Image (cartoon, rainbow, N blue to C red):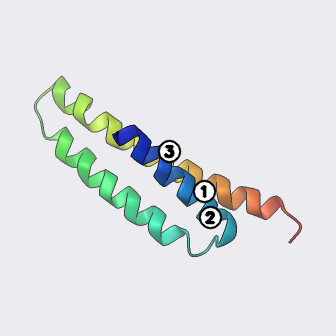
Amino acid sequence: MVVVGIVAVCVVLAILAFFVPRLSRYPERGTQRTLGAGSRAGSKAPGILGRLLSKPFSSSSKAVGRSGSAGRRTRSRFPF
């Protein structure tokens, strides 16, 4: 269920970045800030468990950043 949520957020951010590139940065940063807080909270667990709990949040944050930048990059390639 969480994976579907992250995929949906990535799709919405990519579409938003394509149509309004400047305004897409604020939702992207907010999403990354939220995922970063989850990653920091998960990393407080001791040892290898901390790495295992923080990894899904950090990889989701990377995916959100990539989808936003891909939308803006695609928009820059269009002639309008």
Query: Can you give x and y, in whole percent of width and height, for residue 60 in the image?
Result: 41, 43
Check the picture and name the quadrant holding the N terminus. top left
Q: Residue furthest left?
A: 46
Task: For mark 2, give the secondary structure.
Answer: helix
Are the residues flagged by discs 2 and 1 in contact, CB closer than 8 Å? yes
CA–CA distance between discs 1 and 3? 11 Å
CA–CA distance between discs 2 and 1? 5 Å
CA–CA distance between discs 3 and 2? 14 Å
Q: Residue at x 13, y 41 (%)?
A: 44
Q: Residue at x 71, y 57 (%)?
A: 73
The type of residue carrying mark 2 is Ala
- Label 3 Cα crowd, 10 Å radius (few <14 / some 14-19 / many 20+): some
Are the residues flagged by discs 1 and 3 in contact, CB closer than 8 Å? no
The type of residue carrying mark 3 is Ala
- Judge depth for marks 1 and 3 and give the one in front: 1
Q: Earlier in the sequence, mark 3 or mark 2?
A: 2
Task: For mark 1, give the secondary structure.
Answer: helix
Query: Can you give x and y, in whole percent of width and height, for residue 58 in the image?
Result: 36, 42
The type of residue carrying mark 1 is Ala
Q: Which residue is mark 3?
A: 63
> As rendered, which of 40 and 71 lies closer to the eye?
71
Q: Which residue is mark 2?
A: 17
Query: Can you give x and y, in whole percent of width and height, for residue 69 in the image?
Result: 61, 56
56 is higher (above) or lower (below) than 77? above
Q: Earlier in the sequence, mark 1 or mark 3?
A: 1
Q: Residue at x 52, y 68 (%)?
A: 25
Q: Which residue is mark 1?
A: 14
Query: Can you give x and y, in whole percent of width and height, for residue 71 in the image?
Result: 66, 57
> As rendered, which of 13 and 58 lies closer to the eye?
13
